Image: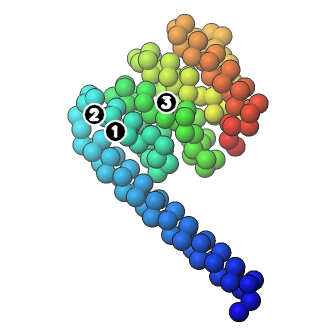
Amino acid sequence: MNDTNLTTTETTAETTAAATAEATAKAAATAAAERLIAEFRALPADSDRKREIITELDANAQALPFLVSVVADPGEYDLARVESATVLRLWPPADPALRHEAGRALLTALRDPEEDLVRQYAAMSLAPYTADPVVATVLNTTARADEDPLVRDSARFAIDEAHRLQETGAGGP
């Protein structure tokens, strides 16, 4: 056997091992997300444990669809919605359809007349979603004309962050 075949065999084995490790990690992340989501759903509506669970789901890509649903639900615990908005800001979905859905969920939260804190965090979290023209328009309007000065400031922050993300290329798709 020549050196080329040996190198190819080693590379194939390394690739297989890496794929197996990635699949195992994804399965573990999915199992952890499912366990935490089930616990979340079993809790009373105003349980602060819900906020803690959202924090535990931070950076778990398997939980992103769930976090989108939490932030969009006006009946959900407000601090869980705030944490979900924060996670969606820090870890926007890579999948374009889910990213679009996340931006729209944050817009839904921004329109919640009962929850000023949720509105502030929703506005602040919209930066990674401004490729959607509807998000960009609502964010600009909010920054100029929202009745709550803290929501206006949060929208301005998001606009500045969106520009920074675009300049650095860190804004994703």
Name the residue beneath numbered marker 3: 86
Name the residue beneath numbered marker 1: 53
Name the residue beneath numbered marker 2: 49
Q: Is residue 85 above or below residue 144?
A: below
Residue 170 is situated, as x and y percent measured from the top left of the image, at 69, 37
The residue that appears at 55% across and 34% down in the rendered structure is: 90
The residue that appears at 31% across and 51% down in the rendered structure is: 35
Q: CA distance from mark 3 to mark 1?
A: 13 Å
Q: Nearer the viewer, residue 97 or 172?
A: 172
Q: Considering the image in quadrants, where does the C terminus appear?
A: top right
Upstream in sequence: badge 3 or badge 2: 2
Q: Mark 1 near mark 2, Cβ–Cβ under 8 Å?
A: yes
Query: Identity of the amino acid at label 1?
Result: Ile
Crowdedness of circle 1 by 10 Å Cα count: few (<14), some, many (20+)?
some
Q: Is residue 65 visible?
A: no
Residue 105 is situated, as x and y percent measured from the top left of the image, at 52, 34
Q: CA distance from mark 3 to mark 2?
A: 17 Å
